[in-house]
Image (cartoon, rainbow, N blue to C red):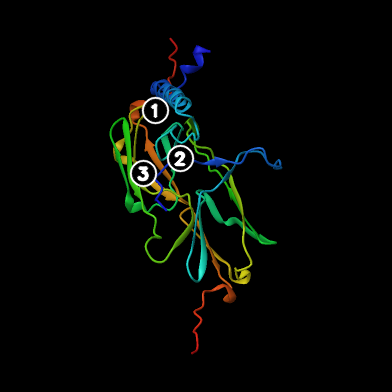
Amino acid sequence: MAITRLFHPTGYNSLYQYDLLQNEMNRLFDSFFGNQTRTRRNGFPSLNVAQDDDNLYVSAELPGIDVNDIEINTDIDTLHINGERKLKESGKDLYYHRQERGSGKFSRTINLPFAINTEKVTAEMKLGILTITLPKADEAKPRKITIKTA
Amino acid sequence: MAEKGLSVDKKEIKNQDEFTQEGPIFTPNVDIYETEEELVLIADVPGVLKEDVDIDLNDNTLTIYAKVKENKVGTLIHKEYDCGDYKRSFTISNVIDQSKIGAELNNGVLRIVLPKAETAKPRKIEIRS
């Protein structure tokens, strides 16, 4: 099925294989140290990447994180997301029964599979989900080639 | 209790009673704390609309069920997290004033306030001499 790969953008394979390799390494690491969780698999936050003809969409679940605490930087082919999750409830006379929600700083960098138009990147936070829209650079967009007839 | 660091640990509910619909169901991470007046439950439910949260109290069991409508754009090329509904139940004792439970949803965080019943609040008893 090698031919199907041709239809993916060039960087796709390296991104995918990086993930596979990382998953494999983590699996080995976890099995060696006794695996309780799968949390090591990715950094925080988890990212989903989608694309259509014009844009690349990177989304992450960041519930309860203030937009002012998130910093997004882009390069021609990389995306950096940094931020901090602060939990409001602290101090006072609180007695915690359960504390499962994490807090702290996070940082992730991903290599993008193609060049993007850095000027037109937009980000939106909705219902605790951050979606970053990265328009493809013109040279990365699919192009229809018309066949000339003699 | 020590503060917890950030991690990706979306826990999927496995081998329970089967659900009628397809797709994974997750247990949201929660913080529960108590003050003198109330018990507060905070759950991370990213991607949930206010209308789609169902909080049900039945025989001392508080059940949170939140539906997620995944808005798909483009075709997925790299996936690290799954989308699915959230469901979790807690047993609530009688000391809660069940008629005054309040809830709010803000930026993917659901906060349920369970006020304690009058009888359950701490009271200082003075000793008369």
Could you tell me which chain the residue with mark 3 belongs to?
Answer: A
- What is the CA distance from the residue labelled 3 to the residue labelled 2? 25 Å
Residue under circle 3? A122
Name which residue type carries label 1. Lys
> Depth check: A32 or B109 in front?
A32
Are there few (<14), some (14-19), or many (20+) residues within 10 Å of tag 2?
many
- In the rendered image, residue B21, in percent from the top left (x then y), is placed at 68, 41
Q: Nearer the viewer, mark 3 or mark 2?
A: 2
Name which residue type carries label 2. Val
Q: Earlier in the sequence, mark 1 or mark 3?
A: 3
Q: Nearer the viewer, mark 1 or mark 2?
A: 2
Whether marks 1 and 2 lie on the same chain = no
Residue under circle 1? A141
Residue under circle 2? B8
- What is the CA distance from the residue labelled 1 to the residue labelled 2? 33 Å
SS class, disc 2: loop
Name which residue type carries label 3. Thr
